[in-house]
Image (tube, rainbow, N blue to C red):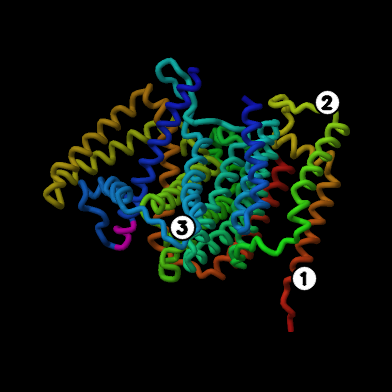
Amino acid sequence: MDVILFLIFATIAVVCAINVVVQTHPISSAVSLIGVMGSLAVLYLLLGAEFIAMAQIIVYAGAIMVLFVFVIMLLNAGAESKRGRSLVAQLLGFPLLIAFLTLVSFLIQRLLPGTMAQFGTFKGGTAQNIGRALFTTYLLPFEVTSVLILIAILGAIVLARKELD
Amino acid sequence: MNFFILSVIKAAVVAFVLLTTLAYLQWVERKVIAHIQVRLGPSRVGPHGLLQPLADVIKLITKEDLIPPHVNKFLYVLAPFLAVTMALISISVVPFGTEITAFGQTTWMQLTDLNIGLLVILAISSMGVYGIALGGWASNNKYALLGGLRSSAQMISYELPLSIAIASPLLLSNTLSLRQLVDTQAGFGFLPHWNIFRGPWPQIVSFVVFLIAAFAETNRVPFDLPEAENELVAGFHTEYSSMKFAAFFMAEYSNMVTVSCVATILFLGGWHPLWPAQYGSSLAPAAVFAGGGALMLYHGLHPARRKDRITLPIFGIIFLAVAVALVAPAVQSVFVPLFWFLAKVGIILFLFIWVRGTLPRFRYDQLMRFAWKVLFPVALVNLLVTGFLVALLG
């Protein structure tokens, strides 16, 4: 059951991810990206990380992608044209992609031998566990990350601010 | 296999009741607003217009399902589907009452209890935005696009105070499972131990913030800018007709029901009564039905219109019979918790309708300023105080 669900949602994730690149219209790409986020959340659920799964949907699919869609709608970006790609890219793109994927799969097999995905055995993914880990073991990285995000927000405000007279 | 059959039956019951509620909620809304505005409201189809929802459904199904030529077809069809699916799914984690035993089977009045139940509702409702945003964009219409833009900006903004308002009662209850959330609010002090009354810091402020943000999340008056008629024709659903329009409509009402259920569970103690059972809280449903039946009998004997002479006494007798049945202990154990839960949900739903009947619409800049400069800081301060007091005294 778990394996079947994994295969279904892994396939959806990969197909959606390819669709993000293939689609010419930004909105269609964004919708495909939402599909990727959603299927990733299901994969997290299968691995027993229910809190991460929901956080994935709420934060990425729900908040960040809404912002993406909002910006695309606001700018009213049109579909990009298929033309204007160089001959080299058209000829070499696909073979290079295959070579890259082969390399990555080879490296994963060499560097992480014998790593098996265990469905349904991991129990440490509840909100309590995550909260405890964040506020005890990983307190410093957690707080530093929040400061980093604060800096990013300040930077965005400074860049976007109109000159005050 | 037993579990499977039981789940299917429960899902069918919940789906049927929910869809009927959605249809009749609309009747209630039209009636209540009509009376607020000193009108009669629907009164032609059936007694007091009670069959109006049925007529509306038939009308919506039989209307021409138009797909305008200038739309993005895939997203145009996907959007209402997405909106209504996401709105209907979230009811699946809501508990309606306690454990019941029927035909030798013991089960909870809930489809499924998850230890992340509240997060599931938040996640699903956050996905519902896409229905409106994409519907507005795919219609390829200026007004619809403006409606979709407004709704996505509004929903992102109000999701923050909403989530923070939710976090404070969670600190008191210390769980994310909706069933356990209700369980932690059992018992009585001077007031019931609901999160809205409970120490160390009663959650009245966060309840109000939650309600206001919920009005905005469900696109209801006074925050219904995505479909502001006098500016945007009909907003994001301008180009939709027939069942696709009905899907948006159902999504809005279904979201209202879900939000009311969540408010009841988080703040108002779920199915726990307002006063203890030894002072007769379990007789309250019977009393309400008996009172309603007596009122209808009285008005049936002094009819304002001729046909009321028949309809009102019939409904009065039905209500009195229900009241008598509700005194029986076997019926009470099932229906008293359900009654209290539905009563609280009903009151919040009435509040939604009441506000729609009485308040004017916000202007868009007021809406945004209110979210970021009033609601968000208030919710944040409330969360800080709650967290501090829970750590100190809890």
Nearer to me, B85 or B176: B85
Q: Where is residue B242 in the image (x, y as percent from the top left)?
A: 36, 53
Which residue is denoted by mark 1 in the rendering? A158
- Asked if the magenta segment contains residue A154, the reply would be no
Q: Can residue A45 be seen in this view?
A: yes
Q: What stretch is highlighted in magenta?
A: B33-37
The circle on residue A114 is 2
**Circle 2 residues within 10 Å: few <14, some 14–19, many ≥20:** few
Which residue is denoted by mark 3 in the rendering? B220
Q: Measuring 24% from the left and 57% from the top, which residue is drawn there?
A: B40
Q: Is mark 2 on a helix, strand or loop?
A: loop
- Which amino acid does the dot numbered 1 rest on? Val
Instruction: Chain letter for mark 3, please.
Output: B
- Which amino acid does the dot numbered 3 rest on? Arg
Separation of residues labelled 1 and 2 (CA atoms): 49 Å
Q: Main secondary structure of the magenta part?
A: helix
- Asked if the magenta segment contains residue B34, the reply would be yes
Q: Is mark 1 on a helix, strand or loop?
A: helix
